[in-house]
Image (cartoon, grey):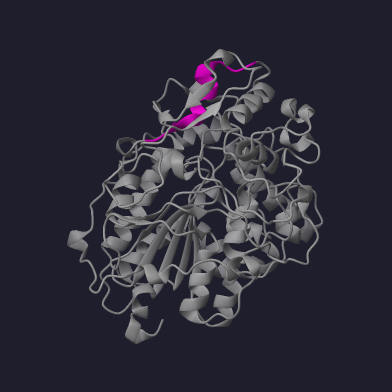
């Protein structure tokens, strides 16, 4: 896009990536029929999933989609690994013995259909959640426990997210790139590849062996500024560790605190590309469903914020920082595009079948668990905020996580596609269609929700959740490779506080600027 065509509309791109929610789970109730020309939500559709015959109260036959009654559902966390997603979207368990196994014990074909051309049915979410609860809790789950998986949030429960989705644009066909969990999808977001890895583990895979070229390197080579902002209490950046073979040299120079983002936005000093990581461990700001931690019940008498509340609060802070930015020469509300998106659906319900898609490298052999990367992950919520977007915009065309790579390449002439995946992804910039920018006074106002303060108690008493173990495990694995010294920390038993204290002292994964900011 040339300057005469309005390239200044995207002088700065900010992406905030939250965790593990599907489109239906978070935005399915956003619009009612007739409110907008087209919207692929849950209202007005007869959506349900069958109850398998071996489940308690199987005579009810179906669990319908319904508004969730509690914040923080589904609780506990559904399965999100590749075998679980296969059951969720295809409805089967193959071989049958996989039904009572954890994902790390499951056998080929890992619940995938024998014919890859079989279309997804999206009718296995209830069955997979029942199987997951049976394995993790050692007993058949009750109806009220497993029916949670079909619960979806209403706009009233998510005032920030819903207000901004209606105030600007939401994508109702935005897909994550891999039908699996966090690391592979976050890797695709910036590299259009995960080097053949599908799961977060073994913990050394990504920090030691993910050598796929990233869009960060293209930006750096072209002299285009970029930064990653993350919560300083997290100690390390997931983005940095996922791409450590490529990005380790930038740990001390391009990784900053989220507090720095707020300051940079106010001063008009945002980089051309900013990527924001919410806190993936307590105090959660990532919207991730709750983990089944051992000591949660001991703290249940205290007011506890959910990760959804934390995500709403962070989203509001980021949005307000951009809405109120009025720098005359740098970044401001008029030239900044904000995208709020999610890495993957995390096992939560969605009714739209993921499409087939070209693999990153059609000549490559099958990757981890035999996956050929020829089909997308599930729909995830994505919201685009810009002065050049009209309110109540719904983008019905297909977009995907690698659309951000495509947009960055087009805007700053960063060369050919990284892989076959971003080659087919749609550019976001053409959606900024207004002839004049909306002044901030016409942007919706959102309040930053106050949160009960339980982060310190959680940090002292509770063990790390699964994603926290993956995150700190990646840091320890990278440190061991660089120093030749084995870790002395047991991540399975360490509290948040002890793990943070240990990881903060590591040398090879030191994010100096983020840590410095947190001590000011």
Say if residue 348 shows up in the picture: yes
Q: Is residue 20 left or right of residue 393?
A: right
| Magenta span includes 148 | yes
Q: Could you tell me residue 240's position as x and y percent? A: 61, 60
Quarter of image, res 217: bottom right
For the point 44% across and 59% down, which residue is it?
A: 397
For the point 54% across and 29% down, which residue is it?
A: 49
Q: Is residue 332 above or below residue 22?
A: below
Q: Is residue 274 left or right of residue 392?
A: right
For the point 23% across and 52% down, which residue is it?
A: 445
Judging depth in this view, the residue of 208 and 119 nearest the camera is 119
Q: Could you tell me residue 236's position as x and y percent? A: 59, 54
Q: Is residue 266 left or right of residue 362?
A: left
Q: Which residues are magenta?
A: 140-153
- Quadrant occupied by the N terminus: bottom left
- Quadrant occupied by the C terminus: bottom left
Which residue lies most toward the left here? Answer: 441
Q: Is residue 436 above or below residue 184?
A: below
Judging depth in this view, the residue of 100 and 123 nearest the camera is 123
């Amino acid at each position: 896009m040339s300057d005469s065509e309005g390239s200044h509309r995207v002088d700065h791109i900010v992406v905030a990536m939250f965790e593990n929610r599907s489109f239906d789970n978070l935005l399915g109730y956003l619009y009612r029929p007739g409110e907008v020309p087209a919207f692929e939500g849950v209202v007005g559709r007869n959506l349900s999933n069958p109850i398998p015959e071996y489940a308690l109260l199987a005579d009810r036959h179906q669990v319908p989609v319904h508004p969730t009654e509690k914040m923080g559902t589904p609780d506990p966390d559904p399965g999100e690994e590749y075998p679980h997603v296969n059951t969720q979207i295809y409805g089967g368990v193959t071989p049958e013995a996989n039904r009572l196994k954890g994902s790390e014990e499951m056998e080929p074909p890992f619940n995938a259909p024998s014919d890859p051309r079989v279309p997804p049915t999206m009718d296995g979410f209830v069955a997979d959640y029942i199987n997951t609860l049976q394995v993790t809790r050692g007993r058949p789950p009750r109806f009220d426990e497993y029916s949670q998986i079909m619960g979806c949030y209403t706009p009233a429960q998510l005032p920030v997210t819903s207000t901004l989705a209606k105030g600007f644009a939401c994508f109702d066909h935005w897909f994550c790139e891999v039908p699996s969990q966090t690391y592979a999808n976050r890797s695709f977001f910036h590299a259009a590849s995960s080097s053949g890895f599908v799961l977060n583990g073994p913990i050394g895979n990504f920090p030691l062996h993910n050598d796929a070229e990233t869009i960060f390197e293209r930006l750096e080579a072209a002299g285009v500024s970029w930064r990653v902002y993350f919560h300083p209490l997290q100690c390390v950046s997931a983005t940095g560790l996922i791409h450590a073979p490529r990005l380790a040299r930038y740990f001390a120079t391009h990784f900053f605190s989220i507090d720095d983002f707020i300051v940079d936005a106010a001063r008009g000093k945002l980089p051309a590309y900013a990527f924001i990581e919410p806190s993936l461990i307590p105090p959660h700001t990532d919207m991730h469903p709750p983990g089944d931690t051992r000591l949660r019940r001991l703290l249940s008498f205290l007011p506890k914020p959910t990760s959804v509340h934390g995500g709403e609060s962070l989203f509001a802070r980021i949005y307000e920082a951009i809405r109120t930015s009025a720098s005359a020469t740098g970044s401001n509300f008029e030239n900044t595009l904000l995208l709020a998106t999610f890495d993957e659906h995390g096992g939560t319900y969605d009714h739209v079948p993921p499409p087939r898609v070209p693999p990153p490298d059609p000549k490559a052999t099958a990757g981890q668990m035999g996956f050929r990367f020829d089909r997308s992950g599930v729909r995830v919520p994505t919201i685009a905020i810009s002065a050049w977007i009209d309110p109540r915009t719904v983008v019905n065309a297909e977009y995907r996580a690698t659309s951000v790579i495509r947009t960055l390449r087009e805007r700053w002439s960063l060369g050919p596609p990284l892989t076959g995946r971003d080659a087919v992804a749609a550019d976001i910039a053409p959606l900024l269609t207004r002839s004049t920018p909306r002044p901030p006074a016409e942007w919706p106002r959102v309040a930053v929700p106050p949160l009960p303060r339980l982060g310190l108690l959680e940090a002292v008493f509770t063990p790390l959740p699964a994603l926290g173990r993956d995150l700190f495990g990646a840091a320890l694995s990278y440190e061991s490779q660089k120093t030749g010294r084995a870790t002395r920390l047991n991540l399975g038993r360490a509290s948040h506080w002890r793990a943070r204290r240990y990881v903060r002292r590591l040398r090879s994964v030191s994010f100096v600027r983020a840590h410095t900011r947190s001590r000011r």
